Amino acid sequence: EVQLVESGGGLVQPGGSLRLSCTASEFTFSSYDMHWVRQATGKGLEWVSGIGTAGDTYYPGSVKGRFTISRENAKNSLYLQMNSLRAGDTAVYYCARGEYCTNGVCSSPFDYWGQGTLVIVSS
Amino acid sequence: QSALTQPPSASGSPGQSVTISCTGTSSDVGNYRYVSWYQQHPGKAPKLMIYEVSKRPSGVPDRFTGSKSGNTASLTVSGLQAEDEADYYCSSYAGSNSWVFGGGTKLTVL
């Protein structure tokens, strides 16, 4: 069974930094795009970043320039470096599997999710 | 990009059908077939229920169906069961390798 396990969340002061990790198992990690999605308490889901199999990265305007997504295929691991954190970044951060494409056919993105890790930005 | 618009709540009695809408724009829902729906129970991670507008992953009951018309996608849950009570979210590809989610709909089984 596909597993995604996030870690690294915690309490950080405004302006501080935090690095989240996601360890994947039971699938060929290097063949899939990967994403981070966050959810503030009582709020909806928000896509935070994505990374392709070639290491190409994508961000929404709300985090561009502050967050950096990366991957280490040898360790089946996904990371999210978060800098200049603000109170509005407080949320549960989920790691989610993205697409796997072969011969022009792609699987569904966001088909598996981790259990999430809580980030609290507060003084 | 702006979040997709979903009604905050929906409800139905056991056995009934309920439809949840997800309204976007011609830059996301209206332009791509990559619309998905997720079910989230309290304290749990989201679970994929529908992808590419109307496809069901293995293991998802056929009581869950998806459709799309123009800029609005819909999720219909037929034969409502108590375990269907949860939050439901839609998502859409929004171009340029970006994705957008909806604000969520709380489904109550009366």
Image: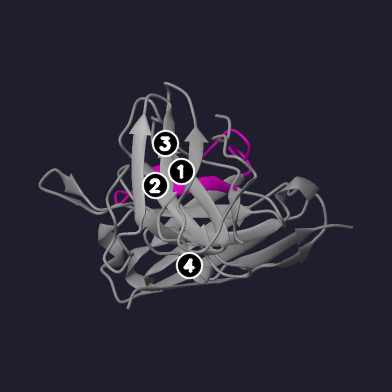
Q: Tell me where residue B6 appears, x and y as whole percent.
A: 57, 39
Question: Going by the image, does A40 lie left or right of A50?
Answer: right
Instruction: Give how far apart the Cα atoms at labels 4 and 1 are.
Output: 24 Å
Work out which residue is located at the far right of the displayed protein and give it.
Answer: A123
Measured as percent of width and height from the top left, residue A54 is found at 30, 49
Marks 4 and 3, the one that precedes in the sequence: 3
The residue marked by circle 3 belongs to what chain?
A: B
Instruction: Give the residues in magenta.
Output: A45-66
Which is nearer the N-term, disc 3 or disc 2? 2
Residue at the spot of label 4: B81
| Residue extending farthest left | A103
Q: Tell me the subunit letter for badge 1.
A: B
Residue labelled with disc 2:
B36
Look at mark 3 in the image and give the residue it sits on. Answer: B73
Secondary-structure class at tag 4: loop
How packed is label 2: few (under 14 Cα within 10 Å), some, or many (20 or more)? many
Disc 3 + disc 1, Cβ < 8 Å: no
Q: Which residue is mark 1?
A: B91
Same chain? Circles 4 and 3: yes
